[in-house]
Image: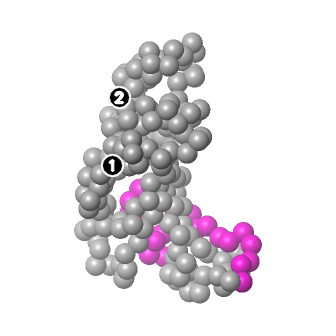
Amino acid sequence: MNRLKKHYEEIIRLDMIRKFNYVNPHMVPKIDKIIVNMGVKEAASDKKQILAPLLILELITGQKAIVTKAKKSISNFKIRKGFPIGVSVTLRGNNMYEFLSKLITLVLPKIRDFKGVPFTSINKYGHLAIGIKDLLVFPEIESEYDKFNRVYGANIVIVTTAKTKKEAGVLLSGFQIPLNKR
């Protein structure tokens, strides 16, 4: 069993039951999935540009990434329906906990001038969105940075089953995600 999953089962869950007075153990919020997404605007003009971000996401997450395609044409952005515009990975189960552990212990502390994730990054549905401008902070990319011609960024969304921002904040703080109450 993963370290974070065990921590959730033994400590966070019991703490949240005590704090929010849940009557049913299934009411306790949990992390449902983590979505890692990269938008690649250059891929609209050159389809080969999608290969590097695809490889990067697979290196970072350890799971096969999918190419996201435009749902409709937008002439101002020179995008046609069906053009590749990004890559995405949805992590669940053990892969999710492994990635979260890596994110908390290795990646976030390496970000320059990192003062914590703002509490306002949690939306009203209890999902936390984090934007990382430079993926070189991931150890897998750090060792392979010479193979990529430019620096890529990504959006990471941690989807929880929490009903409120407060529940999500307590849950994510239990996982030692550094939340700032700005």
Mark yes or no: residue 38 visible: yes
In the rendered image, residue 159, in percent from the top left (x then y), is placed at: 53, 43
* Three-letter residue code for mark 1: Gly
Element under label 2?
Answer: helix
In the rendered image, residue 9, in percent from the top left (x then y), is placed at: 41, 24
Q: Quadrant of the C terminus?
A: top left
Magenta range = 51-75
Q: Nearer the viewer, mark 2 or mark 1?
A: 1
Q: Quadrant of the N terminus?
A: top left
In the rendered image, residue 10, in percent from the top left (x then y), is placed at: 37, 21
* Three-letter residue code for mark 2: His
Mark yes or no: residue 63 visible: no
In the rendered image, residue 181, in percent from the top left (x then y), is placed at: 39, 41
Relative horizontal placement of residue 125, taking residue 72 as reference (left or right): left
Identity of the residue drawn at 29% across and 74% down? 145
Which residue, given by chain and number where applicable, does mark 2 sit on? 7
- Estimate the spatial distance between the alpha carbons at disc 2 and disc 1, rounded to whole Å: 21 Å
Which residue, given by chain and number where applicable, does mark 1 sit on? 116
